[in-house]
Image: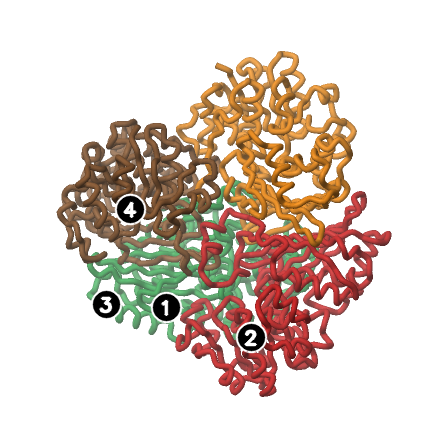
Chain colours: A brown, B orange, C green, D red
Amino acid sequence: MIRVGVLGATGYAGAELVRILAGHPGVELTAVYSRQYAGVPFTDIYPSLSGVTDLVCEELSIESACGKADVVFMALPHKLPMELVPVCIRKGVKVIDLSADFRLRDAQVYEAHYQQHTAPDLLAKAVYGLSEINTERIRTADLVANPGCYPTSVLLPLAPLLKANLIDVESIIVDSKSGVSGAGRSPSLTVHFCEVNESLKPYKVATHRHNPEMEEHAGAIAGRPVKITFAPHLVPVTRGMLSTIYTRPIVKIDEDDIQRCIEDFYGGRSFIRRLGRKRMPDMLHVRGSNYCDIGFTLDKSRGCLILASAIDNLIKGAAGQAVQNMNIMLGLDERTGLAMTPFPI
Amino acid sequence: MIRVGVLGATGYAGAELVRILAGHPGVELTAVYSRQYAGVPFTDIYPSLSGVTDLVCEELSIESACGKADVVFMALPHKLPMELVPVCIRKGVKVIDLSADFRLRDAQVYEAHYQQHTAPDLLAKAVYGLSEINTERIRTADLVANPGCYPTSVLLPLAPLLKANLIDVESIIVDSKSGVSGAGRSPSLTVHFCEVNESLKPYKVATHRHNPEMEEHAGAIAGRPVKITFAPHLVPVTRGMLSTIYTRPIVKIDEDDIQRCIEDFYGGRSFIRRLGRKRMPDMLHVRGSNYCDIGFTLDKSRGCLILASAIDNLIKGAAGQAVQNMNIMLGLDERTGLAMTPFPI
Amino acid sequence: MIRVGVLGATGYAGAELVRILAGHPGVELTAVYSRQYAGVPFTDIYPSLSGVTDLVCEELSIESACGKADVVFMALPHKLPMELVPVCIRKGVKVIDLSADFRLRDAQVYEAHYQQHTAPDLLAKAVYGLSEINTERIRTADLVANPGCYPTSVLLPLAPLLKANLIDVESIIVDSKSGVSGAGRSPSLTVHFCEVNESLKPYKVATHRHNPEMEEHAGAIAGRPVKITFAPHLVPVTRGMLSTIYTRPIVKIDEDDIQRCIEDFYGGRSFIRRLGRKRMPDMLHVRGSNYCDIGFTLDKSRGCLILASAIDNLIKGAAGQAVQNMNIMLGLDERTGLAMTPFPI
Amino acid sequence: MIRVGVLGATGYAGAELVRILAGHPGVELTAVYSRQYAGVPFTDIYPSLSGVTDLVCEELSIESACGKADVVFMALPHKLPMELVPVCIRKGVKVIDLSADFRLRDAQVYEAHYQQHTAPDLLAKAVYGLSEINTERIRTADLVANPGCYPTSVLLPLAPLLKANLIDVESIIVDSKSGVSGAGRSPSLTVHFCEVNESLKPYKVATHRHNPEMEEHAGAIAGRPVKITFAPHLVPVTRGMLSTIYTRPIVKIDEDDIQRCIEDFYGGRSFIRRLGRKRMPDMLHVRGSNYCDIGFTLDKSRGCLILASAIDNLIKGAAGQAVQNMNIMLGLDERTGLAMTPFPI
């Protein structure tokens, strides 16, 4: 049995990894690491998961992790992974990193938005883990950079149209709405119930770090530079992300063409639910699952194609896609351990 | 493979039954019936379940159901089941009824709170489906009356103490808080978002129909009449029920005694999570699962033992317990198809 | 004392009118009319307002209203007002109509989106009640067509830039997020708590009836046709509307220019709070008030100016602006009766 | 004009004080103090209040406050006020303290639940500011100890019955539900949106510090010791508190008697809305106001009288009652500056 470990297990993405991996039939979860809770039983921190695992959080140690696991998940803040990943690579341990450290191909872009990169040589080795797009390269990767939640929700609906060269790549506008869990578990005024409840606001408009990430990988798919104006919004729900994407078709197309384009692109992939023309997705309908729901509407008279996608930011936007990537790396069915159906409500 | 059908599949409890049964490894879901949506694919009504089933809702017909299923679930408003159940019993089809029609042993009590009973002879045949309490009788039942959500949340924590004769049965007070899904899917001002959000209120205090139900079955467990003052409250969450129960110990006991009493009673049962002394349950920690979490605090100086329980009203309070009862009836492990872990958040 | 009456007093916008007018020092609320609740004391329907008014709802009658009031507010569904308004005009009673019936100048556009117009001759007489824009014309109006909530939230931030001819009028994109009260008080699945809570979804993308309304009045401000791609979203809050507006500057401008443009335009108007560059509005910060908060961010490298506005959809988006218009019509300070400060949280 | 100042102005209760006092026609708000935000304009911290005040937060200084204000409000954590209040008293400045420091008559009880009391001599001087109960003593007080939110919500409905000696004082049970703002503005996991949303849980059952406070003042009203079993619950709303109170009548009474008892007791007091028999209060209906709504139901067959009250925990439970007390101390109408009507929704 393949052994897996989670570093940063007590953040929200980490805890979702623990929940999913503990129930995964193809791997054994052998160790969980936490900087804050070393020595504490995992389910003392997450009583909802009582019964799922008996593991006790261990002091963060990459040596320990490499000894106990064949695949290591890192659900840590950026900066830490670029120090730890080289150790894993040296020891032949595969890594799925949920931070931003290995998502950008160009160290300079990374350094402009984060800080100095201390393992720039590994950037070329890292595969961007957008499961449905980079499947083949993920299969043989030793290091997967798991995408950000916003880029996942933006790239999946855009990919078919970018690939088919149907839209203007200079004028894409993305208006994203994210649930609060995307901000992480650390207490702050930003996530205080009373500041979020009955509130809704844009934040980091045109300055969010996921903006260059989505532009780079959209460019890779399109084969030419792509410009995306990006405005994220914080909304009063726990989980969920909905991105509304405004694009300008550059060829004469109707809704049939668009539907066919998306359908052909994602044909066999079961986590992408294509809702079809005029049926737009709802954040609630993917809650708790690894699905990405995609819908679209063509505003013909105004020359605008509106795409929308919905994901659960903690699953398809983080832990779920990470496990999907692991499945691909291990040669398993990509759905293994991820058969989570959303609730009716 | 055992074939199962759901009548009233498009209400919230019905939809949960469909979700759980469609993924159940021991049975085959063969038909779903709906009075309102006959002819409509089930997942058109619940897009979140897209991919789970291809079934199309059929016109409500007990003959059809008895032909297509070995076990029939009824998620219908009361009054209808007492007309349909006799047909099933005649045809040798097992029934799990989620309505109130067969929950009360005494037709007169039923008629005082509902309406005339048209199948009173079946009342003695029906087994009250409180899975952990009536396990043996459920095993051989042809007709299971699935408990109400409130009685489930109240009887499970009370049962060990009633059985052990540790508390005054004349002065039990229950303050319950229920999520909105308990009110069903039919639109009304009561469930209008703007009337519920940021609201919290008691309703039907001392007049709720679940009050005689919980008193009758508490009495059956205690072996003598039990009086329960019951105040339900509507709270702005979708799913979840938390009951806080105030009792007066009639013998000198400390927290160790109470913990042992509960532990001994539920020893091997995996859906009852005993939190132990002073650790009180949280509605969020059971959301999406078939768990009932139970905690307690002894207010020694005031002579009051406070118990609290948390369940997901649609699962342990409805569809989940119904499937658990089916598992018991069919001789399966009671957990089959019910291994749903709550999310970390 | 000026006498005022409210037709359709028991919907959410109507009830807000009652609340505001009952406390207004310059007018006397003499009658409230309801189709559904004739004969019922108003505060039986809205217990929160107990103590505010003793009025009993009367059967809807325009004759009665014209007898008892000098100014009539209509908070009715469209179609009804165009039948009642002519009576008021004949009798010399001023009308503020919150429906869509008199918002569009062109009967044909109205008929394309609603139904046949039965009082087209009054369309030229009606003044579009965007208080800060059409102040002078409102002053002398007999019939004010109170703007829709979406158009209010879109036109107020756009007006200065349209007037100054700074942005491309062919490529405006509006992504609006509305609280649930905008959908009205009538129960339906759309506003069921369980369908809205933890949900977020676009609806009526490019087909919403407020789309032609905002285009017409944006065109009137700009002095040339304006195209707006419009995607409304339903969000799980009771009150509030946030519109994010994506525009392309057609001249070289920086953030100082934009700030000055908005500042100059709204100089003395106290309900428009200009947040200034990079400070984006929050729905929560205007909740319960007649404010419209406006912020903006210039995404220079991508050639996009992002504006955002926040209003309380029931106040500045409906009842508050209606009373503001009444104040202007009556020659009162526009703030009279509207000094409602949002809560800190 | 009377000058007033607020110490601890940037917590939630403090900010409510600022909002109310800034709009109060009988006093002038001259200074606001904050330990955390000295030098920052108040509305930078609370943008929603932009336009309400131009005051800049000052470094906490009791000397400064006593110089600038005739009445000082303290919205500080306990322990600090008992150090500052003696200064005010010496200088002849009146104090309304929202902390627990002067609420308990007996220093030993205080010390058992908080810490050493450093100004025990002032305890006898302090008047417990339950406005409707202690009106006369508040009128001449120099130091008012503003009640806790829970005790306010519990004592107001109980007072008439305790005074009339109608209920058993040994077996009172209180199940309270509080909105999150009661936990204050400091970030912590307890108030993290994701931990509160869709959650509901009891906490500090039988150990909450407001328990001895409500027992002491219930005893003062009843004229004999009162025992209250108290279980507070945290619920996912921003503002609001609902207490459900279970009592046992000790004389033969019916609902008319109870209604008359409450009516007689509160006759002229406009902030106590008596809903009458069987009509139970809703947290939403008092949101944003200084009202306390009281309802009751008599469960005759089980010998239990259930009372329920609803308040806005930040207003009647904190800042509103504090201003009401100030009004009484200054000989103003107690409603001055507090005419806040709840919204329809």
Question: Which label lies toward us, 3 or 2?
Answer: 2
How far apart are the alpha carbons under marks 3 and 2? Answer: 50 Å
Q: Nearer the viewer, residue D131 or A59?
A: A59
Q: What is the three-letter code of the residue carrying label 3?
A: Asp
- Residue D81 is labelled as 2
Question: Which label lies toward us, 4 or 2?
Answer: 4
* Residue B220 point in image, percent of width and height: 73, 30
Q: Residue at x 44, y 49 (%)?
A: A237
How far apart are the alpha carbons under marks 2 and 1? Answer: 36 Å
* Residue A334 point in image, percent of width and height: 30, 30
Residue on which the image places disc 4:
A61
Q: Nearer the viewer, residue B289 or C268?
A: B289
Q: Nearer the viewer, residue B245 or D6?
A: B245
How far apart are the alpha carbons under marks 1 and 3? Answer: 16 Å
Residue on which the image places disc 1:
C275
Q: Secondary structure at mark 4?
A: loop
User: Taking the image as drawn, is residue C92 in sight?
Assistant: no
Question: Which label lies toward us, 4 or 3?
Answer: 4
Compared to residue D18, the image places residue D312 above or below, namely: above
Give the chain letter at badge 3: C
Q: What is the three-letter code of the residue carrying label 2?
A: Pro
Report whether A157 appears left or right of B253: left
How far apart are the alpha carbons under marks 4 and 3? Answer: 49 Å
Q: Secondary structure at mark 3?
A: loop
Q: Residue at x 32, y 31 (%)?
A: A27
Asked if badges 4 and 2 are on one and the same chain, I answer: no
Q: Secondary structure at mark 2?
A: helix
Residue on which the image places disc 3:
C254
Q: Residue at x 73, y 33 (%)?
A: B222
